[in-house]
Image (cartoon, rainbow, N blue to C red):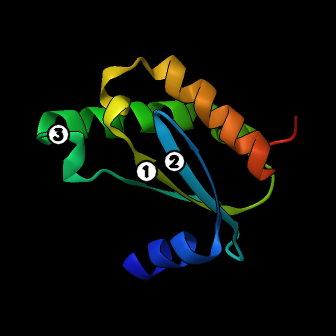
Amino acid sequence: MNKDFRRLYYRGKSVATPCLVTYAMKSREGESRYGITTSKKIGGAVERNRSRRVIRAAFEQLEDEISGSWDIVFVARTKTSKVKMQRVKSEMTEHFKKLGIINE
């Protein structure tokens, strides 16, 4: 698992905005996979868990629009736990378009 994350960090493309960083790479697997990273810089357990919940909720709404199979890692930032899911979703949509994950 950690090996897959490291592969994305070094070989994948990335896009960063104030609330979210997205790493993505085409996958040879038959389906898309995603992971979420939240460091202790985000805050305590409550903030980290909220960040993960917000990212997961935003991704679930965009999951059907993904074309092809991708490996994706989302990295939460300090702002992530303090904003609404809609903001994270709009940033995620922007990232997906830049990375070619969804068609514009």
Quarter holding residue 82:
top left
Task: Please name the residue shown 39% across and 44% down the image.
Answer: 76
Q: Amino acid at mark 1?
A: Val
Q: Position of residue 28 (x, y in %)?
A: 72, 77
Q: Which residue is mark 2?
A: 21
Whether residue 99 sits left or right of residue 81 in the image: it is: right
In the displayed structure, 19 sits above or below 69; it is above
* Element class at badge 1: strand
User: Within 10 angstroms of label 3, few (less than 14), some, or many (20 or more) residues?
Assistant: some
User: Residue 88 in the image: x percent, y percent?
Assistant: 51, 28
Q: Tell me if mark 1 has few (under 14), some (14-19) or many (20+) residues whose alpha carbon lies within 10 angstroms of its own.
A: many
Give the residue at x 75% y 38%: 65
Q: Which residue is mark 1?
A: 75
**Numbered tag placed on residue 57 in the rendering:** none
Q: Amino acid at mark 2?
A: Val
Which of pointers 2 and 1 lies earlier in the amino acid sequence?
2
In contact (CB < 8 Å): disc 3 and disc 1: no
Q: Residue 44: x and y, percent?
A: 11, 40
CB-based contact (under 8 Å), mark 3 and mark 2? no
Quadrant of the snapshot with the C terminus: top right
Q: Are marks 2 and 1 in contact (CB under 8 Å)?
A: yes
* Image quarter in which the N terminus is found: bottom left
Give whichever of 8, 54 is nearer the camera.
Answer: 8
- As helix, strand or loop, the secondary structure at mark 2 comes to strand
Q: Which is nearer the N-term, disc 3 or disc 2?
A: 2
Q: Position of residue 49 (x, y in %)?
A: 23, 39
Residue sticking out furthest to the bottom: 3
Q: List the residue tagged with mark 3.
A: 43
Disc 2 versus disc 1: distance between alpha carbons? Answer: 5 Å
The answer to whether residue 104 is left or right of residue 98 is: right
Q: In which quadrant of the rendered view does residue 71 lie?
A: bottom right
Give the distance between the C-alpha atoms of the residues marked 3 and 2, in whole angstroms: 17 Å
